[in-house]
Image (spheres, rainbow, N blue to C red):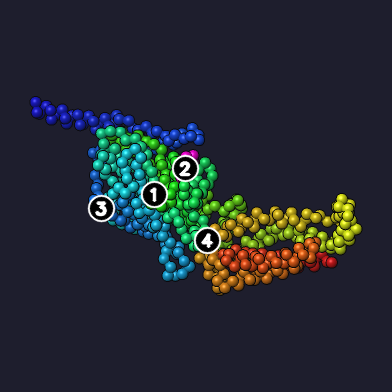
């Protein structure tokens, strides 16, 4: 009887494993997250059958730190949550000094919710769950690819594995989060990947002029400053490609793979940190099965070429305002010239010259029209005196004078209006370009993203602007002309603290305009 019982048990176990491996369902059903905005189905999460007998049972009593070094960064991952503790960029410093520390991202996140911590909703996976690492450290040469696996074995009978895949020469990181159900009951739930960062930052630091959460969903960019989520959370649930925390120059982001982000919630957490929570579509994992959710991570500089290489429209995180469609080509042009002349200051000068050439016909027409109008000023004064009590008669006489002398009163304005979007686009491109950060020009200008330390270029800009104003013909009255001549003083004070790259652009533009005005003054003689 005992022998028969043993044989029955052995046969039952054998039948169970044969059924699981060959006859069982190949995919567990996935329940998409309900959306109140649209009934579009979320792409299914890839699932696969895993035999419980071959799942490693790694355990860790105490959380261990793991150092990862590549050509681009050094990172510290923690066994607490299998999360990122800090990532230091090798090519960027905090200040423009040789002894300044390298830029470190994610280092000031919530210690209870490290960046890329994972929470289980519907099953008990805490963000500080202890994971055992597959290696105490990793080093990757330029062309190498390696993985770091964190394994957590729960008391409830399931295993969570977080697999980070690195390349030696890139900023992108692949993340696979896997739930293996060794328990006797199905698990229904979802993963939440968390990014945290300080809520209050020093806005005097140029790097934090723009700071907050950022997200690309429903084909548009959404940004939230910390103050926007002080009293209430923000939630997004529609076609989310990525979400993250950004400042002026750097970005920490989680990118969706195959619809792996169903919703994102932005909030101020109980510990007072800015928190971005990305929730996966809901899944069901039956006993003996596993579910895998794929993500990509980016922790690095907002260099437009690097961002674009990540895919998922991550380059949209470089927000250049209303004139982005013009600003980004100018940024690409700046980098193009840098490839031939490795000096961004020279690149700014070249772009300024090219823009001046492109718009020469328009500005030439504008200044010529203003010159013609100034020649009619004595006649205009006589007409005002003649028709001082007859407004309608004055308007008719003025229009007749314009027709007689073939002068368009709007000729001096319209060509200039066309150039305004271009000027603002270039302003944005230079203002938010990480390429100019700590980039030297020549002599005393060692950082094109910072102000001129001796204020020489702003003063020269003010002088050239004053000369330009004096040379520009005008049909304004004496008081208006005095007001206009005060503008160079106002602009000089404004530009004292502007990035020197922007001042350089304005200075060169003024010099070219003076030359153009001298040419027009000779061409259109009094």
Which residue in the protein does label 4 denote?
435
**Could you say where residue 295 lies in the image, as x and y percent from the top left?**
41, 45
User: Along the polypeptide, which appears first: circle 2 or circle 3?
Assistant: 3
Q: Which residue is mark 2?
A: 235
- From mark 2 to mark 3, how far is it between C-alphas? 35 Å
User: Is the Cβ of the residue at disc 4 closer than 8 Å to that at disc 3?
Assistant: no
Residue at numbered disc 3: 62
| Lower position in the chain sequence, tag 1 or tag 4 | 1
Q: Residue at x 62, y 67 (%)?
A: 493
Mark 1, residues whose alpha carbon is within 10 Å: few (<14), some, or many (≥20)? Answer: few
Q: Earlier in the sequence, mark 1 or mark 3?
A: 3
Measured from the top left, where is residue 518 in percent x and y? 76, 68
The reply to whether residue 292 is visible in this rendering is no
* Quadrant of the snapshot with the C terminus: bottom right
Which label lies toward us, 1 or 4?
Answer: 1
* Circle nearer the viewer, 1 or 3: 1
Check whether the beta carbons of the residues at disc 1 and disc 4 lie within 8 A of each other.
no
Report the residue marked by disc 1.
270
């Amino acid at each position: 009887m005992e022998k028969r019982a043993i044989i029955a048990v052995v046969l039952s176990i054998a039948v169970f494993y044969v059924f699981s491996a060959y006859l069982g369902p190949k995919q567990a059903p996935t329940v998409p997250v309900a959306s109140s905005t649209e009934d579009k189905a979320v792409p299914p999460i890839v699932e696969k059958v895993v035999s419980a007998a071959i799942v490693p049972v790694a355990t860790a009593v105490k959380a261990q730190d793991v150092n990862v070094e590549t050509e681009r960064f050094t990172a510290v991952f923690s066994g607490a949550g299998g999360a990122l503790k800090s990532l230091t960029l090798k090519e960027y410093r905090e200040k423009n000094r040789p002894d300044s520390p390298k830029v470190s991202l994610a280092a000031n996140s919530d210690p209870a919710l490290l960046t890329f911590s994972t929470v289980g909703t519907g099953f008990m996976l805490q963000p500080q769950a202890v994971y055992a690492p597959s290696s105490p450290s990793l080093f990757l040469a330029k062309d190498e690819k390696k993985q770091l696996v964190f394994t957590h074995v729960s008391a409830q009978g399931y295993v969570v594995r977080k697999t980070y895949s690195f390349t030696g020469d890139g900023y992108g990181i692949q993340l696979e989060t896997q739930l293996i159900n060794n328990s006797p009951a199905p698990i229904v739930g979802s993963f939440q990947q968390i990014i945290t960062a300080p809520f209050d930052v020093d806005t005097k630091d140029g790097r934090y002029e723009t700071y907050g959460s950022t997200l690309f969903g429903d084909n548009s960019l959404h940004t939230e400053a910390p103050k926007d989520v002080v009293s209430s959370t923000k939630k997004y649930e529609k076609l989310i490609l990525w979400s993250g925390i950004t400042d002026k120059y750097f970005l920490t982001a989680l990118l969706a793979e195959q619809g792996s982000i169903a919703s994102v919630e932005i909030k101020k957490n109980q510990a007072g940190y800015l928190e971005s929570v990305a929730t996966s579509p809901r899944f069901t994992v039956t006993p003996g099965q596993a579910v895998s959710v794929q993500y990509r991570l980016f922790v690095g500089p907002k260099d437009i070429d690097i961002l674009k290489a990540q895919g998922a429209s991550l380059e949209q995180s470089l927000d250049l305002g209303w004139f982005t469609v013009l600003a980004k080509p100018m940024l690409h042009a700046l980098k193009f010239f840098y490839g031939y002349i490795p000096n961004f200051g020279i690149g700014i000068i070249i772009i300024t010259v090219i823009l001046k050439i492109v718009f020469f016909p328009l500005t030439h027409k504008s200044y010529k029209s203003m010159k013609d109008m100034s020649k009619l000023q004595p006649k205009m004064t006589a007409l005002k005196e003649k028709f001082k009590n007859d407004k309608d008669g004055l308007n008719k006489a003025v229009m007749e004078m314009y027709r007689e002398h073939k002068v368009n009163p709007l000729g001096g304005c319209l060509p200039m209006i066309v150039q305004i979007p271009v000027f603002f686009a270039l302003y944005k491109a230079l203002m938010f370009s990480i390429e100019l950060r700590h980039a030297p020009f020549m002599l005393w200008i060692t950082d094109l993203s910072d102000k001129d330390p001796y204020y020489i270029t702003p003063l020269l800009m003010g002088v050239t602007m004053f000369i330009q104003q004096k040379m520009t013909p005008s049909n304004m009255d004496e008081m208006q002309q005095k007001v206009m001549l005060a503008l160079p003083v106002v602009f000089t004070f404004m530009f004292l603290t502007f990035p020197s790259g922007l001042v350089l652009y304005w200075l060169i533009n003024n010099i070219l305009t003076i030359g153009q005005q001298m040419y027009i003054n000779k061409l259109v003689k009094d």
